[in-house]
């Protein structure tokens, strides 16, 4: 990829992302919803290239509904499973139109999977509402719980990616899962886990939570981010594609930028709800 293009895209995108997080509330929800729909478009395009024939519009609508459910927990409380069930039913009905039952089954399965896969981004909004309040007087008290915990997630994933890249490039020798992603090394993962753990510890301290949680949460988020990256690589390999799209010059598509968050966001939400809140 063109380094200059990557740099320009990063200079434009990072401030926009930080502004959206700083505003929070409906703007953050709208941002996650937009990214989810764009990611859904890309994943269903990849599925078609891989030989499947999903109902892209229905799948994108289901993914958006799941995100909206997370964005308005009070208004739609307890409706997550219901929305999912209705989506599965509607997509099944659409599959009836396929003459060959095998075609209908694969379209049904691919659409439901693709919708729920990209809608994992909804956990960015869920952790924002589930996270504990930030005590007064701590370094990040002015940031607040919603923004603070979303920033923890983002910085944890970014630090893992950076640590894994730098370590892998400098001392990486032991490759793994080369049939999915030939460049990944064990040394890179170790470096990324270390970087993520340090960043998570600092963020937890700033949010008024026990930094010792980072000894577990840091590696969990790092490994979840790595798994998310590898999962998208499986989809791209099956589709014979290098990138999920061309929306971001020098970076590929939206899915290429958020793949790690798809797995890291629900892991953080579960950890916070179970052990920190």
Image: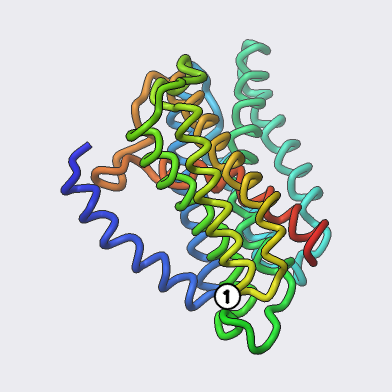
Badge 1 local density, few (<14 within 10 Å), some, or many (20+)?
some
Picture coordinates of residue 140, whole percent (x, y): 57, 79
> Which residue is rendered at x = 49% and y = 26% of the image?
235
Picture coordinates of residue 19, whole percent (x, y): 41, 73
Observer-nearest residue: 227 or 72? 227
Query: In the drawing, does residue 277 fall left or right of residue 247?
Result: right
> Do we see residue 261 in this rendering?
yes
Q: Give the residue pinned by disc 1.
A: 25
> Do we see residue 120 in this rendering?
no
- The quadrant the N terminus occupies is top left
Picture coordinates of residue 27, whole percent (x, y): 50, 72
> Which residue is rendered at x = 44% and y = 25% of the image?
236
Picture coordinates of residue 42, whole percent (x, y): 43, 38
Query: In the drawing, does residue 65 fall left or right of residue 198?
Result: right
Colour logic: rainbow
Observer-nearest residue: 230 or 116? 230
The image shows residue 232, relative to residue 225, as above or below, that is above
To which quarter of the image does residue 164 belong?
A: top left
> Which residue is rendered at x = 34% and y = 27% of the image?
242
To which quarter of the image does residue 208 belong?
A: bottom right
The image shows residue 21, relative to residue 90, as above or below, that is below
> Which residue is rendered at x = 54% and y = 51% of the image?
196
Query: In the drawing, does residue 198 fall left or right of residue 130?
Result: left
């Amino acid at each position: 990829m063109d380094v200059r293009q990557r740099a320009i895209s990063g200079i434009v995108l990072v401030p926009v992302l930080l502004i959206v997080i700083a505003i929070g509330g409906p703007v953050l929800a709208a941002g996650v919803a937009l990214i989810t729909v764009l990611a859904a478009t890309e994943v269903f395009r990849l599925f078609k290239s891989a030989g499947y024939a999903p109902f892209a519009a229905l799948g994108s609508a289901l993914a958006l509904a799941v995100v909206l459910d997370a964005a308005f927990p009070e208004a739609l409380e307890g409706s997550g499973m219901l929305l999912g069930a209705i989506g599965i039913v509607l997509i099944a009905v659409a599959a009836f139109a396929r003459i060959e039952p095998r075609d209908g089954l694969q379209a049904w399965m691919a659409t439901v999977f693709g919708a729920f896969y990209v809608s994992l981004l909804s956990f960015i909004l869920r952790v924002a509402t589930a996270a504990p309040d930030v005590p007064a007087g701590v370094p990040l008290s002015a940031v607040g719980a919603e923004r603070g915990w979303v920033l923890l997630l983002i910085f944890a994933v970014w630090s893992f990616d950076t640590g894994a890249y730098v370590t892998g490039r400098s001392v990486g020798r032991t490759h793994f899962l080369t049939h999915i992603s030939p460049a990944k090394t064990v040394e890179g993962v170790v470096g990324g886990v270390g970087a993520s753990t340090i960043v998570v510890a600092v963020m937890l301290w700033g949010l008024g939570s026990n930094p010792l949680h980072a000894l577990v949460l840091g590696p969990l988020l790092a490994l979840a981010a790595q798994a998310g990256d590898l999962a998208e690589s499986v989809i791209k390999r099956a589709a014979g594609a290098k990138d999920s799209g061309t929306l971001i010059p020098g970076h590929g598509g939206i899915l290429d930028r958020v793949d790690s968050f798809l797995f890291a966001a629900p892991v953080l939400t579960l950890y916070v709800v179970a052990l920190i809140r």
